[in-house]
Image (spheres, coloured by chain):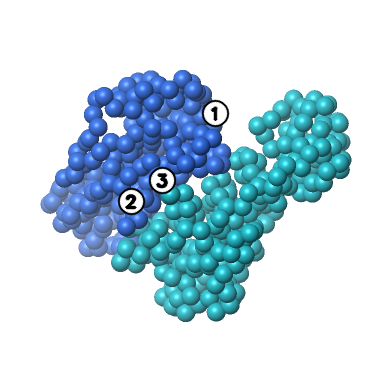
Chain colours: A cyan, B blue
């Protein structure tokens, strides 16, 4: 079946009842008793489930097979973005970034970022829809909003410069996106393949000079995303796509 | 002023009256008589205009200076995308692609694309808003929908393989995006710098095998946009961003 279902905990032999919101797809897809479903848990596991009852209010699916967990890519993309006034823009960034491939998303409160009460549950719902859409088994990690100062302190280069990612040990590369007059320092030239990337994206107004300075003191490298002025969510998505691109170039 | 106004025809010394929709920004920006505006015509020209009257219903601006036209980039990106059922998705692709940099957009009717009556005037409005937002002077070329067969006939490799772009002569590189089992033929590896790129993006269902075959016969190279399944507008935007990325790598 070319559709994925989502259930957070999957164990072989276990019988699960899908929440109605998931189960309603059983009807639209005309699933019958005895059919098999593909179910992901958002933690890299894809399972086969045999439908014992396709009843929406009270479905019953038995997990008959646990397939290999999704292979980890040899790099890790962590985008830290200043919240925008409109949650829609953050939500579509999330949807698109997941489709292309993102591992972790943080939200930072900068001196110029606008107030935004991001609904964590909505973001999770969007993420689940996106991994199902792109036939993926892993949800990105989504961190709650953090003050800019606290964020750069947490990721200060003095603390660590390498991190484990599955079998691999990846070098941590820290970037802060801003619009320099010198556009040679573009992200594509500063980032190298197979690393842990942390990119900070400011709000429409960009980062303040003090913030840029503090970030540099914390080991972040200033990079340009090109010669044009980008909206916050465009800049965030562009950096995610560009990092995927440089890792695809052989 | 960090905002652009739009007026299609700009000539030195000429006096123009902005359409009310544009003129209303004079009020929000508190523009006074004697102030100067930055005005773009969407064809690469940025002009200075002196405000003789900031009246919304009957504004009067004199063009006092024509600045250098926007420098042409040494490459050209033309994305041909199958229309999606929801126009929103096409419209945001348009907005984001313009922010990052796109030269031409075509819409193709494929065997699996859904009916969509794209509103040309809405697309133009979106484009104007996007170039103003990203402080640009040039609108992309937007072509009306075309049957897939007619489209590949028009761009058949037998017809031409080079094209003029400003001073430059660019090689034409034709691609059709599909999801092959072999993901080594990714767009980033098949496209080379400083060329005219034409990338065809199918609808959710992708292109039919016949369409892929016909495209190959017409000189289009099959490329992958990565291992994941992408929505139409995500694939279109990704290919646009990836082509910008490879041209930024020094």
Residue lying at 53% horizontally and 67% vertically, measured from the top left: A172
Distance of mark 3 from mark 2, alpha carbons? 10 Å
Between marks 2 and 1 in the image, the one whose residue lies nearer the viewer: 2
Residue A58: x percent and y percent? Answer: 86, 36
Residue position for label 1: B205
Q: Is residue B199 visible?
A: yes
From the image, state whether disc 3 or disc 2 is nearer to you.
3
**Tag 3 near tag 2, CB within 8 Å:** no
The secondary element bearing badge 1 is classed as: loop
Q: Chain of mark 3?
A: B
For label 3, the residue is: B188
Q: Is residue A65 left or right of residue A68?
A: right
Q: Position of residue B163 (x, y in %)?
A: 22, 36
Name the residue that disc number 2 marks.
B247
Taking A129 as reference, is A229 above or below it? below
- Badge 2 local density, few (<14 within 10 Å), some, or many (20+)? some
- Which quadrant holds the N terminus of chain A? top right
Which residue is found at the position 86% from the left and 31% from the top? A52
Judge whether B222 appears above or below A192 on screen: above
- Viewer-side residue, B56 vs B178: B178
Residue A59 rendering spot, x and y as whole percentages: 84, 35
Tag 2 subunit:
B
From the viewer's perspective, tell me whether residue B64 is left or right of residue B121: left
Residue B88 appears in the figure = no
Tell me whether circle 3 and circle 1 mark residues in contact (CB < 8 Å).
no
User: Reading the chain from its start, which is encountered first: label 3 or label 1?
Assistant: 3
Q: In this rendered view, identify the residue nearer to me: B43 or A78.
A: A78
- Asked if the residue under mark 1 is in contact with the one under mark 2, i.e. CB atoms within 8 Å, the reply is no
> Which picture quadrant has residue B249?
bottom left
C-alpha separation, residue under disc 2 versus residue under disc 1? 30 Å
Residue B248 relative to residue A131: left or right? left
Query: What residue lies at 82% left-to-right and 39% top-to-bottom?
Result: A63
């Amino acid at each position: 079946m070319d559709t994925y279902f989502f259930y957070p905990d999957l164990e072989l032999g276990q019988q699960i009842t899908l929440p109605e919101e998931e189960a309603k797809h059983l009807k639209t897809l005309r699933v019958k008793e005895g059919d098999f479903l593909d179910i992901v848990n958002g933690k890299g596991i894809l399972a086969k489930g045999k439908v014992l009852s396709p009843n929406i209010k009270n479905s019953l699916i038995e997990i008959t097979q646990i397939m290999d967990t999704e292979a980890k890519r040899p790099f890790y993309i962590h985008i830290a973005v200043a919240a925008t006034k409109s949650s829609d823009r953050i939500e579509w960034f999330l949807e698109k970034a997941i489709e292309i491939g993102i591992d972790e998303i943080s939200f930072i409160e900068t001196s110029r970022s606008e107030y935004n009460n991001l609904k964590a549950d909505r973001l999770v719902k969007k993420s689940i829809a996106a991994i199902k859409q792109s036939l993926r088994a892993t949800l990105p990690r989504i961190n709650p909003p953090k003050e800019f100062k606290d964020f750069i302190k947490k990721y200060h280069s003095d603390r660590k410069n390498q991190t484990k990612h599955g079998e691999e040990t990846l070098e941590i590369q820290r970037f802060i996106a801003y619009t320099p007059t010198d556009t040679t320092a573009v992200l594509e030239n500063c980032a190298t393949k197979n690393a842990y990337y942390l990119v900070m994206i400011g709000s429409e107004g960009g980062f303040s000079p003090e913030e840029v300075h503090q970030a540099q003191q914390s080991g972040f490298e200033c990079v340009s995303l090109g010669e044009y002025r980008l909206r916050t969510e465009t800049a965030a998505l562009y950096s995610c796509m560009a990092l995927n691109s440089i890792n695809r170039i052989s």
